[in-house]
Image (spheres, rainbow, N blue to C red):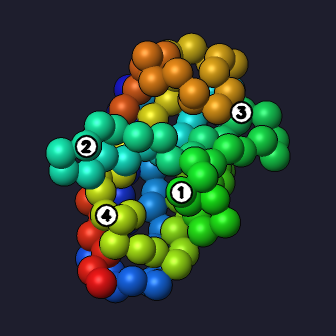
Amino acid sequence: VQLQASGGGLVHTGASLRLSCAAFGRSFRDYSMGWFRQSPGKEREYVAAISWQPGYTKYDESVKGRFTISRDKAKNSIYLQMDSLKPEDTAVYYCAAPRYSGSDPYLEDMREIGYWGQGTELTVSS
């Protein structure tokens, strides 16, 4: 089972970018999935999550209104549309899913994460 994140890059302040995370090896249609990020010298932090139930999403306050998480169950993928990017968004972004289907709908307990992607790096220059 593998989560593959992609789409990172180097952009300027105010730019937009979309991250993708494709899952391989099993279906994640009944799993919540989400995004975390880690900046140099900092702990990994929560960004956003999307429930297996339609229409349920949650965002960290630092990205609310600028980032949008979505999923395509048919493609076993999730996405993170990032708008109005800021230098403080610079980080390695990881997609994740909980250990069990139907659990932790908003990925609020990092200890329950059972699957991590390899990370994709975003740099926002000022």
Query: Where is mark 3, residue-wise?
Result: 52
Camera-nearest label, 1 or 4: 1
Residue kind at label 2, given as amino acid type? Lys
Dot 3 crowding, Cα within 10 Å, few <14, some 14–19, many 20+? many
Camera-nearest label, 2 or 4: 2
Query: Where is mark 1, residue-wise?
Result: 62
Camera-nearest label, 3 or 4: 4
Sequence-wise, which precedes: disc 1 or disc 3? 3
Query: Whole-percent x and y of residue 73?
Result: 66, 44
Camera-nearest label, 1 or 3: 1
Query: Where is mark 4, residue-wise?
Result: 90
Contact flag, marks 2 and 4 (Cβ < 8 Å): no
Contact flag, marks 1 and 4 (Cβ < 8 Å): no
The Cα–Cα distance between marks 3 and 4, rounded to whole angstroms, is 28 Å
**Observer-nearest residue: 24 or 86?**
86
Q: Is residue 34 above or below residue 126?
A: above
Residue kind at label 4, given as amino acid type? Thr
The quarter in which the N terminus is drawn is: top left
Local secondary structure at mark 3: loop
The tag on residue 42 is 2
Q: Is residue 110 visible?
A: yes
The Cα–Cα distance between marks 1 and 4, rounded to whole angstroms, is 13 Å
Q: Is residue 94 above or below residue 67?
A: above
Local secondary structure at mark 1: loop
The Cα–Cα distance between marks 1 and 3, rounded to whole angstroms, is 23 Å
Residue kind at label 3, given as amino acid type? Trp
Contact flag, marks 1 and 3 (Cβ < 8 Å): no
Residue visible at 70% across and 35% down in the picture = 51
Sequence-wise, which precedes: disc 1 or disc 4? 1
Residue 8: quarter of image? bottom left
The quarter in which the C terminus is drawn is: bottom left
Residue kind at label 1, given as amino acid type? Ser
